Image: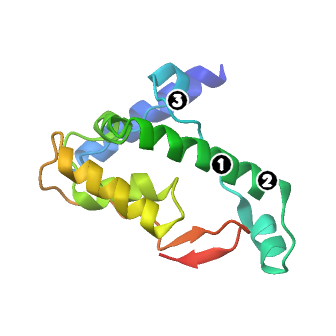
């Protein structure tokens, strides 16, 4: 029942995105069902953010960082994963879309820069497009928000 509801919701959302002129799609399936090589991450929520702000390192924040690190290593081994994930969602994408996808896994500025250079060097199918908006904040190793 839940699976059918999620599929129906995705169909309706995609129909309305198309009507509104957006070149992006929502897929209700799990990463595994989609063939995505990355592990899904989760939103930490306000309570975990408040704990991090008080200097308390939450277990969920640590788990999220571990998943992000494993995903970053997967992207470093096979950067094409980023292009594959983006083309599942939209037919065209811009440099900012690449950056947002990498940004979800990589905190370190130098590591981020090196991955972006590799991705931009391969430029598999990138065409000018309206860039996606990614969050202006990211989480540091302690779970606290940091400016991008």
Q: Quadrant of residue 99?
A: bottom left
Q: Which residue is mark 1?
A: 42
Above/below status of 106 relative to 47: above
Q: Position of residue 136 (x, y in %)?
A: 47, 74
Q: Which residue is mark 3?
A: 31
Question: Quick one: label 2 or label 3, which is nearer the N terminus?
Answer: 3
Q: Please tell me the numbered disc located at residue 124.
A: none
Q: CA distance from mark 1 to mark 3?
A: 13 Å
Q: Quadrant of residue 24?
A: top left
Q: Secondary structure at mark 1?
A: loop
User: Residue at (52%, 43%) from the top-left corner?
Assistant: 73
Q: Nearer the viewer, residue 130 or 10?
A: 130
- CB under 8 Å between discs 1 and 2: yes
Q: Which residue is mark 2?
A: 60
Q: Nearer the viewer, mark 1 or mark 2?
A: 2
Q: Position of residue 62 (x, y in %)?
A: 77, 55
Q: Position of residue 47 (x, y in %)?
A: 81, 67
Q: CA distance from mark 1 to mark 2?
A: 9 Å
């Amino acid at each position: 029942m839940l699976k059918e509801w999620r599929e129906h919701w995705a169909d309706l959302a995609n129909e309305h995105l198309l009507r509104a002129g957006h070149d992006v799609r929502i897929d209700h399936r799990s990463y595994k069902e989609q063939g995505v090589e990355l592990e899904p991450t989760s939103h930490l929520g306000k309570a975990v953010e408040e704990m991090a702000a008080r200097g308390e390192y939450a277990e969920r924040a640590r788990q999220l960082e571990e998943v992000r690190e494993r995903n970053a290593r997967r992207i470093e081994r096979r950067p094409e994963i980023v292009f594959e994930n983006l083309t599942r969602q939209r037919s065209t994408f811009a440099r900012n879309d690449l950056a947002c996808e990498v940004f979800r896994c990589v905190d370190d500025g130098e590591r981020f820069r090196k991955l972006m250079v590799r991705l931009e060097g391969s430029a598999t199918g990138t065409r000018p497009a309206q860039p996606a908006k990614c969050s202006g904040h990211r989480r540091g190793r302690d779970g606290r928000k940091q400016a991008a």
